[in-house]
Structures are given as C-alpha cells and as structure tokens.
Image (cartoon, grey):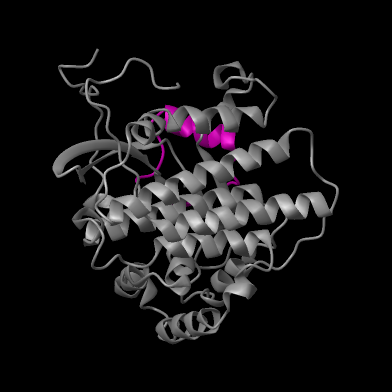
Amino acid sequence: MGQRYVLDAEIIQELVKPIERPIPSGLDVMGVLGSERAKEIQLSKEENQGWKDYPKEFDRLRDKFGRLSDKQWMGNMYQGWLWTLKGFLEPFGEGYPSFMTNKTWVEKDLNTALGSWSELKHDTILYGKQSGAEMGGAGFKEVVGYVEPNIEVYEKLLWLTKFSRKNLSARDLTIEGIDMKMEEFEKLLDFLISCSIKELKNEELTIEEYEYIQVYGGVLERLTASFAGDYLRWFEITSETDKNMAVIADFHTIAPNSYSQGGYMEAGVGPAYEIYVVVPIGGKLYLTRGAVFSYHEFISDMRLTDEKWQEMIKEDKQPNMPKWTNSFVRGGKGEIPYPEDYE
C-alpha cells in the first residue's frame, strides 16, 4: 500500500532540524493544532531552544493550518480525527463547571488528545507517510452520574462516525452488522450531547439517564468486542494483545549521525487511569470517578510492537509519563474505595 500524505507528519517534519532539533514531540502537533499549553511547554523546553528558528516555524505552521476551514478538516477520515481532537485543545470559559476551567483540566485534556493521537498513529502506521530525521451490577441507593460536557468533541465524533459509515457504504466496504453498530454508537453520542446540554443549563438528569450512565462502560465494551465477532464478549477474545488497550507506534525516525546513534520516536497509550472529579449534581457536590488516558512518549532503539510494549508495562519498565502530567496524575496503586452503602 503506497503511503499517503498526512497533515501531522508535515508538522513533525517541518519542526525537525538535523543536529539542532532532531527529536520531535506529539506536543508539536497539538501546539500547531491550537493548544496554547502545548506551545508553552515546547517553547520553555531547553532542548527546543537550540534551534533559534523553532518558534518562528511553529507559528508559521500554526497560522497555515489555522486557516483550514471546517470543510477542509472534514475532507477525509484521518483529518477528521485530528479535527475532533482540536475539541480538546481550547480552554473552557464561563458557563462550564469549575472543574473544567482550570489549568489542570487543560493538561488533562491535552493528555487525552495525545492518547487518542497515539491510537490514530497506531491504526494508520502502514498508511500514513512517516516523518524522518462489565454492564454495571448492583447499584447504589442513590444512582447518579455525570457526563463531561464537551459538546464540541461529541458533535465532531458524531460527524466522524456518520462520515465513516457513509464512505464505507459508498465504497462497498461494509461488513455484516457494522452499519447497525455504528448507528448504535451514534445514538450513544446523541445521548452524551443531550446530557451535556442539560448539565450546562443546570438541569438535573432523569433517573433513566442516570441509569444509562451507569451502564455506559458496558455498552462501549459490548460494541468494541462486537467488531471482533457478533455476540462476542470481551473476555472471550482469544488474543491477550487485542484485549489490552495499550498500543504503541513510532511516528518519527531519527537517523544516526556523529551526535546520535539514532532511534525511533514512540508514542504509546498505557493502561487507563482512574480520575476523580468533584461535580455539581442536583444542587449538591459529588466526588465522581471516571477513566483517563495515559500517554507516553520516548526514544527507542528498536521499533516496538504492541506485544513488546505491553510486556514492558507488565514488568513496570515503561518510561514515565511527561512531567507536565504531574498536575493531575499521582503515582502508586491503592485499593479502590467503595461507599459504605454499596449494595
């Protein structure tokens, strides 16, 4: 399969200069796509100050891709995915819950965007030209839940799903049952949008909506597993690699020279971490628990496979997450706390 131009590879290629700045970062991509926090991190790093033209090239690319219209972003599925990630890169202002309007949440969303970008690179590693230099269970006495009200991301995901379904059908690439599964995912996104609008209007959700939030993870699990086979349950998938969410992809090749032995710049997703957030529900504050990506970026002397990456994580040999994630990530494992009135 011939490799194709992909927008983020151009960003990485243009922000690499032999000797002066041979090592790029996923933060380059997110910064050019609009993240002020990513730009701030990159411009403050000592290793990026060896190339005096780096800030100028960064701003040039940000201006270039900032001029793209929504129609251009929606030109294909790859760019549509990047367009969806842009919804994580803008800070939230007045009218949003207080937990979403601080610097820590900005960095959490940046981490989420990078985690999803890692999966994009993993899924398209042979396509895109690389740059070089359970369902709930017993309930609580009071069933409540909360949807992170990021309407822009949900709406773009809804467009991307419909766009994917339309293009698969137009090219006669649909497989049995996939249309119905994608329609179900579209209904799920409609539900998230509806809940988000209510929350931003300070309207309380219905009991039925709270109950659906409780089984939301199970719905996603069933849909995901169904792509491996109809009526297949997650634990019935035979490949341990496929059951593990940890994936990795090399997105840049570093050529050997007199200053470096070379290597491969890797972007990887590790296990999901638990995230605890205080949210307003029905005039009260609740401590809620959800899940968040873990993102890793490092140089490897070999191209890592998913199997090797998962083995590194199992043996606790994976590199640390970027330092800027320390604002919302705390190391160490502990027992999951359950309320005393859990039945």
Give me the residue at 59% from left, 32% from top.
223
Is 142 in front, or is 297?
Answer: 142
Verify whether residue 39 appears in magenta: no
Q: Quadrant of the N terminus?
A: bottom right
Give me the residue at 34% from left, 37% from top.
273
Q: Residue 151 in the image: x percent, y percent?
A: 42, 57
Please say if 117 is above or below 216.
below
Q: Which residues are magenta?
A: 297-320
Q: How many marks?
A: 0
Residue 149 is left or right of residue 247, and the answer is: left
Q: Quadrant of the C terminus?
A: top left
Q: Residue 215 in the image: x percent, y percent?
A: 42, 28
Is 339 in front, or is 126?
Answer: 339
Please say if 63 is above or below 292.
below
Please say if 125 is above or below 305.
below
Query: Can the viewer see residue 256 in this picture?
Result: yes
Residue 76 occupies quadrant: bottom right
Residue 306 is left or right of residue 165, and the answer is: left
Give me the residue at 64% from left, 42% from top.
183
Q: Residue 287 in the image: x percent, y percent?
A: 19, 37
Residue 304 is left or right of residue 141, and the answer is: right
Is 92 in front, or is 260?
Answer: 92
Give me the residue at 44% from left, 62% from top.
87
